[in-house]
Image (cartoon, rainbow, N blue to C red):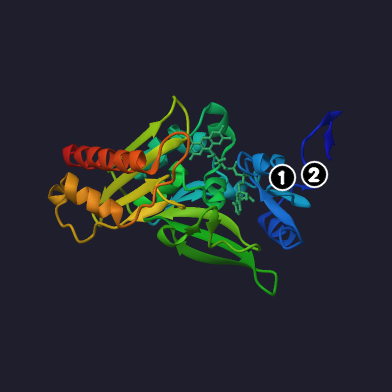
Amino acid sequence: MSWIKGIKLLLNDFVYKAPRSLNEALKLIREEDAKVLAGGHSLIPLMKLGFASPESLIDIGKLEELQAIEETNGVLTVGSCVSYRALFESEMVKSYVPLLSKVASQVGDPQVRARGTVGGSLVHGDPASDIAGAILALDATVELVSLNGKGDIVKRKVPAREFFVGFLETVIEDDEILHSISFKNKCHKFSFQKITRREQDWAIVGVAVAQSMHGIGIGLVNLASKPVYLDIKKYEDISELDPEGVSLLLDSVIDPPADIYGDAEYRRHLAEVLLLRCLKEIKETT
Ligand SMILES: Cc1cc2nc3c(=O)[nH]c(=O)nc-3n(C[C@H](O)[C@H](O)[C@H](O)COP(=O)(O)OP(=O)(O)OC[C@H]3O[C@@H](n4cnc5c(N)ncnc54)[C@H](O)[C@@H]3O)c2cc1C
């Protein structure tokens, strides 16, 4: 059991390490039973519940290079340790991919938005992650880093649509850190619809839609065991999508969970209503 300033924490003992560089962090995570800590809003609750008990926590939250938001050659890159608040306050994000800004402003409450990070949410791989819905819709690329045999940093790029593989499971390897998320398409037509039980809460169901010059992307939140991408490339005109068409399309990818907030049928119904609302909003955006 750990103690901080005389307060007993309901956590197993662990060693806290705060590396000063990405290279050092990547070395430290290769140690046995080490886990990356960013904002701690998903990991610490898991540790309190006893579902995770790493021997050491490698705090990457203060590494400057993971906090950057920058545009180079028309590609916007968001560091993995950017908080939701920094994301929705960024003018660059608002002008490039405003969907991301809108979604970030609706995650949890002010405390969660101040500490929770984009990378933490994606690596945690919760099917109810709002930001996952947005990056699927925006056809983003996830950039992972690790050390090669010579100790140099190497990058691996994964399309967001291939990043999530199952419940709380992604393609990231134990020796990798999510470095950043990049967006190559500017996208000003978008819609995000989220039904919550109360203000500032998780989505019972959420739908994110983005339209760029390359087509429409749809990300679905809390409608299967992982965040889901809905492919509608075969529809050249979205006005072809009536309620029946939307229902058939959704059926091909969703497998809604059931919990105290709603059964699978209720979630299926919400998904249809929200997707139709999103498509209407997109159509009406000039
Ligand atoms: C009260 C509350 C309300 C919430 N409401 C919402 C909501 O409405 N919508 C929503 O989408 N989410 C919600 N969340 C979840 C919140 O968005 C996530 O907990 C948060 O974003 C996770 O980020 P973090 O930085 O805290 O990650 P951490 O808890 O630090 O880490 C989470 C996991 O990711 C790993 N990790 C973190 N960063 C990296 C990295 N860069 N590279 C490799 N691995 C990494 C950690 O090892 C850990 O396994 C809520 C959480 C709380 C506590």
267 vs 11, nearest the viewer? 267
The total of numbered circles placed on residues is: 2
Q: Earlier in the sequence, mark 1 or mark 2?
A: 2
- Element carrying mark 1: loop
Tell me if 72 is positioned left or right of 235 in this view: right
Residues at marks 1 and 2 touching, judged by CB atoms closer than 8 Å: yes
Tell me the residue at 44%/54% (across/down): 182
**In this picture, residue 101 sits left or right of residue 109:** left
- The three-letter code of the residue at mark 2 reads Asn
Left or right, 146 with respect to 214, comes to right
Residue 46 coordinates in the image, percent (x, y): 66, 43
Write down the quadrant of residue 99 in the picture: top left
Residue nearer the viewer, 139 or 186: 139
Tag shown at residue 262 = none
Q: Is residue 90 visible?
A: no
Residue pointed to by mark 2: 12
Say which residue label 1 marks: 50
Q: Residues within 10 Å of mark 1 (few under 14, many from 20)?
A: few
Label 2 CA crowd tier, 10 Å (few <14, some 14–19, many 20+): some
- Quadrant field for ligand 1: top right
Q: What amino acid is found at the position of numbered circle 1 in the picture? A: Gly
Residue sitting at x 36%, y 49%: 219
Image quadrant where one finds the N terminus: top right
Locate the C terminus and report the quarter of the image it occupies: top left
